[in-house]
Image (tube, helix red, strand yellow):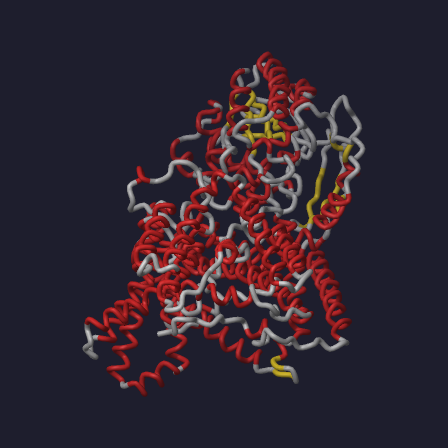
């Protein structure tokens, strides 16, 4: 085989094969090589930025024109009879039509048809169907699913709006009850829990950022930065890892919530008590559900997460709160265990559910509502079997 | 610090800078010693955890002294003692758990230190004229921070030739540029290529647990098998690139550990291109002496080629077994040894059947080479399941789609690897054939500056965006 003493094999392309002398660099290379490097960096940055812009054009929205965002008595709500648009790179063109009450309900609320079952939906931007066409939002799909399952005429009046936090829902409960619902469906997200006591979108002056944070912010928000994030975070595993290591926005996924989150849950409890008390007095049941965010749904689907985290913890906490006040909790999170790649149901950059995500939510909610949670909406056995949330 | 991180690069570059403040071998040795001790201290984070390592080093050095002074006639007992202590400290699972040390201690890099110590002891035992190895030289050699975590496994004489040279090897702007380029390449391989491949691989693995159609699982099975060899190559060779470059900046030439392993057209050839220093070490200290010993006992010419096959099996079984302490690595070793042995038997059989000249012509045939290359890759990819997975995972993965579909997957891997690797070799040859005055256009310094800049910028951007600790170097765990 080989001789006992193996001579060192060096990479001839690295060392030139001779270590005792070195070829001199031509003088011009002292200028040419660094210049070439700088030019390469510039060309690369330009190419990535242009590619990012082409693949993910900036969001152009007129939605602010349809918002009344300075009414602390009622929270943010829509300008009555207004139409606004959103052109969002990942989604294309979306129109927001607000009715005479400033709701993106798809229709006006008239008197209840005889025999109809009226659901009034409350909650924030997910329920409103932000970034998706109205007809593709689960607010529009759910009544159709329920009608198919129950054979009843189901009306769903969507009063969800941006920043409709638990405090705003509690503030508006009389208005909601005045719409004579048979059921109040309350859509919550961990974002709502984290802002439970807020009325309007926080408008505090932004904290001054250090240079590092400014550079990072500029890079992250550049089109090249967005392109890179989208490419790298397509992998659910990679996205979850990054999300859990992030800047504290993932605190709701902790197995043991910190003091801030415990405080938010106490706020939710307070507002839940108000809503349930009023609704009970009016004889209207309240059903609450927690919508998972992208990382949460991926963790549940993969069935794998690092120690110290629990994607079901917030779910358990909210169930405890709402059931203690006599409400009904619709637990859709476990269903994500049998949904492969639920992250495909969310916009990559924004995080709101996309059309696929809304369809999934609609199916899951319909399945829960017709499985005994709300007796008036019980489906028959054949229809229940057909409503497999994994399909 | 124990990976291909910015911190490790910065540390290494700082050590190289300080080392080059003087050409004096004393100065360079002091700097290497100090850097290595600081590196060890940063990894160990405590003195008491280093006691077993220190004792192991002391055992090695005492053995050297005893042999040098001829107080021990042969190195055999020292070798056995060092081997037993190594196995004990590494907690090989075939030993009863009760005999292990039950306090936490530092064992990173022990496998590589083991090879270096054993090499010194064997060479000292064999040499007629015993050459003294000072304590300083011994510690510099065994604890050298550039080779501490994952090798390469360097011979002492080669280390001493460079480290203790009166006139250190040349280090000018061209060499510095080449080393910086190599570091960028290594950093990119670990922090971008390996990281991205690992993301894809983990997603493919997760797919097996999901309710997806069989076609999706077959695709995942294909991905899972194909991705890991590339991940391992990028992860390990990337770190090796960095340490070789750092050592060169400190005027020490480390041996190469990889030589385009996926270009290998046989499993025997593969192991002369993958983790080269490990297979060379075992060939030198296991294969050669074992073959000589067996040939002395069986002088029959007809048997000798088969003795070579047996020695290949034993050598590469040990290559596999060295990687881990559990039964999975035992099987991994059997597969490495078996793969090499069967390959050798195939070569022998074919040469006998066709005749040597015809066999050589066949081996040079591009179609035969392509299929052989694909098979080599496929076999290596298959054996790696016992490298990264435990029995439970192996069971789940193979049960997820059943035996017949897995056969189909392996066939697809073989055929795909045949075509893709052949295409790559062809493309590489074509690109290298485009020449300018100084040599191939695409290995000229201008082209290299451009694509190293691209690799560097992309590596920096990806590292910043991912914002995660540098990926672990797989081979540091051995």
Tell me if residue A197 comes above or below residue A221 in the rendering. above
Question: Can residue B1 be seen in the rendering of this structure?
Answer: no
Of residue B203 and residue A371, the one placed in the foreground of this image is B203
Tell me if residue B273 comes above or below residue B221 in the rendering. below
How far across and how far down the image is residue B233, in percent? 48, 61
Give the left or right position of residue B365, taking residue A199 as reference: left
Q: Quadrant of the C terminus of chain A?
A: top left
Give the left or right position of residue B102, taking residue A14 as reference: left
How far across and how far down the image is residue B6, in percent? 63, 52
Give the left or right position of residue B242, taking residue B370 as reference: right
Give the left or right position of residue B423, taking residue B405 as reference: right
Of residue A166 and residue B78, the one placed in the foreground of this image is B78
How far across and how far down the image is residue A335, in percent? 46, 36
How far across and how far down the image is residue B143, in percent? 51, 53
Question: Can residue B193 be seen in the rendering of this structure?
Answer: yes
Residue A284 image-quadrant placement: top right
Tell me if residue B177 comes above or below residue A297 in the rendering. below
Of residue A261 and residue B156, the one placed in the foreground of this image is B156
User: What residue sits 62% from the left and 65% below the top?
Assistant: B179
Q: Looking at this view, name the residue that lies furthest to the bottom.
A: B357
Of residue A123 and residue A174, the one placed in the foreground of this image is A123
Residue B253 image-quadrant placement: bottom right
Q: Quadrant of the N terminus of chain A?
A: bottom left
Q: Looking at this view, name the residue that lies furthest to the top.
A: A281
């Amino acid at each position: 085989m080989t001789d006992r003493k193996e001579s060192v094999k060096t990479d001839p392309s690295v060392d030139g094969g001779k270590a005792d002398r070195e070829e001199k660099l031509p003088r011009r290379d002292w200028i040419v090589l660094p210049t070439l490097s700088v030019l390469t960096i510039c060309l690369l940055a330009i190419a990535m930025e242009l590619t990012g812009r082409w693949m993910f054009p900036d969001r152009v929205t007129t939605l602010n024109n349809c918002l009344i965002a300075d009414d602390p008595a009622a929270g943010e709500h829509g300008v009555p009879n207004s139409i606004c648009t959103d052109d969002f790179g990942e989604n294309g063109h979306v129109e927001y039509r607000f009715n005479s009450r400033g709701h993106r309900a798809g229709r006006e609320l008239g008197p209840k048809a005889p025999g109809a079952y009226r659901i009034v939906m409350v909650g924030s931007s997910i329920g409103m169907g932000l970034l998706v066409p109205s007809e593709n939002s689960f607010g529009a799909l759910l009544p159709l699913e329920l009608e198919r399952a129950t054979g009843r005429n189901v009306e769903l009046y969507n009063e969800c709006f941006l920043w409709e936090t638990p405090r705003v829902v509690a503030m508006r409960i009389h208005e909601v009850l005045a719409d004579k619902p048979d059921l109040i469906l309350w859509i919550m997200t961990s974002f709502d829990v984290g802002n439970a006591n807020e009325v309007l979108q926080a408008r505090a002056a932004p904290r001054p950022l250090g240079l590092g944070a400014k550079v990072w912010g500029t890079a992250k928000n550049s089109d090249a930065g967005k392109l890179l994030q989208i490419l790298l975070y397509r992998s659910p595993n990679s996205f979850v890892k990054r999300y859990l290591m992030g800047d504290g926005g993932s605190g709701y996924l902790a197995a043991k919530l910190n003091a801030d989150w415990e405080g938010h849950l106490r706020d939710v409890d307070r507002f839940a008590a108000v809503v349930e008390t009023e609704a009970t007095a009016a004889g209207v049941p309240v059903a609450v559900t927690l919508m998972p965010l992208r990382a949460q749904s991926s963790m549940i689907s993969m069935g794998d997460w690092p120690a110290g985290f629990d994607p079901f913890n917030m779910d358990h906490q909210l169930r405890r709160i709402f059931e203690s006040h006599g409400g009904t909790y619709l637990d859709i999170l476990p269903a994500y265990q049998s949904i492969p790649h639920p992250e495909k149901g969310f916009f990559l950059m924004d995080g709101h559910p996309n059309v696929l995500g809304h369809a999934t939510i609609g199916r899951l909610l319909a399945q829960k509502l017709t499985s005994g949670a709300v007796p008036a909406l019980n489906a028959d056995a054949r229809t229940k079997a057909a409503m497999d949330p994994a399909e | 610090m124990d990976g291909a991180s910015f911190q490790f690069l910065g540390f290494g570059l700082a050590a190289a800078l300080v080392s080059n403040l003087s050409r004096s071998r004393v100065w360079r040795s002091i700097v290497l010693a100090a850097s290595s001790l600081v590196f060890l201290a940063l990894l160990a984070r405590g003195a008491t955890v280093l006691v077993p390592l220190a004792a192991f080093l002391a055992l090695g050095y005492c053995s050297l002294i005893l042999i040098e002074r001829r107080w021990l006639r042969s190195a055999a007992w020292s070798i056995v003692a060092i081997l037993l202590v190594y196995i004990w400290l590494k907690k090989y699972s075939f030993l009863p758990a009760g005999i292990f040390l039950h306090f936490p201690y530092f064992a990173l890099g022990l496998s590589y230190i083991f090879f270096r110590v054993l090499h010194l002891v064997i060479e000292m035992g064999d040499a007629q004229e015993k050459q003294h190895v000072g304590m300083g030289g011994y510690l510099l050699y065994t604890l050298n921070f550039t080779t501490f975590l994952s090798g390469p496994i360097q011979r002492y004489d080669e280390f001493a030739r460079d480290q203790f040279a009166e006139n250190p090897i040349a280090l000018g702007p061209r060499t510095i540029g080449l080393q910086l380029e190599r570091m960028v390449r290594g950093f990119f391989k670990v922090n971008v290529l390996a990281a991205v491949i690992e993301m894809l691989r983990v997603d493919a693995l997760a797919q097996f647990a999901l309710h997806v159609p069989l076609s999706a699982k077959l695709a995942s099975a294909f991905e899972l098998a194909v991705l890991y060899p590339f991940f391992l190559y990028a992860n390990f060779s990337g770190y090796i690139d960095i340490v070789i470059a750092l050592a060169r900046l400190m005027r020490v030439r480390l041996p190469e550990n990889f030589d385009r392993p996926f270009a290998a057209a046989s499993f025997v050839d593969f192991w002369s291109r993958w983790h080269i220093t490990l297979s060379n070490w075992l060939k030198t200290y296991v294969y050669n002496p074992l073959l000589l010993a067996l040939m002395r006992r069986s002088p029959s010419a007809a048997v000798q080629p088969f003795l070579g096959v047996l020695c290949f099996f034993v050598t590469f079984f040990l290559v596999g077994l060295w990687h881990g302490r559990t039964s999975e690595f035992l099987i991994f070793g059997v597969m490495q040894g078996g793969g090499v042995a069967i390959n050798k038997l195939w070569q022998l059989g074919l040469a006998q059947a066709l005749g040597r000249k015809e066999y050589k012509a066949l081996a040079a045939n591009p179609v035969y080479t392509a299929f052989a290359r694909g098979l080599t890759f496929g076999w290596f990819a298959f054996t790696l399941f016992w490298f990264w997975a435990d029995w439970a995972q192996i069971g789940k993965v193979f049960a997820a789609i059943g035996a017949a579909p897995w056969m189909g997957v392996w066939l697809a891997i073989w055929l795909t690897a045949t075509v893709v690797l052949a295409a790559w070799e062809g493309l590489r040859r074509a690109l290298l054939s485009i020449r300018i005055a100084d040599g191939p256009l695409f290995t000229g310094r201008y082209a290299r500056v451009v694509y190293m800049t691209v690799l560097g910028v992309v590596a920096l951007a990806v590292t910043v965006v991912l914002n995660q600790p540098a990926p672990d170097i797989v081979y540091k765990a051995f």
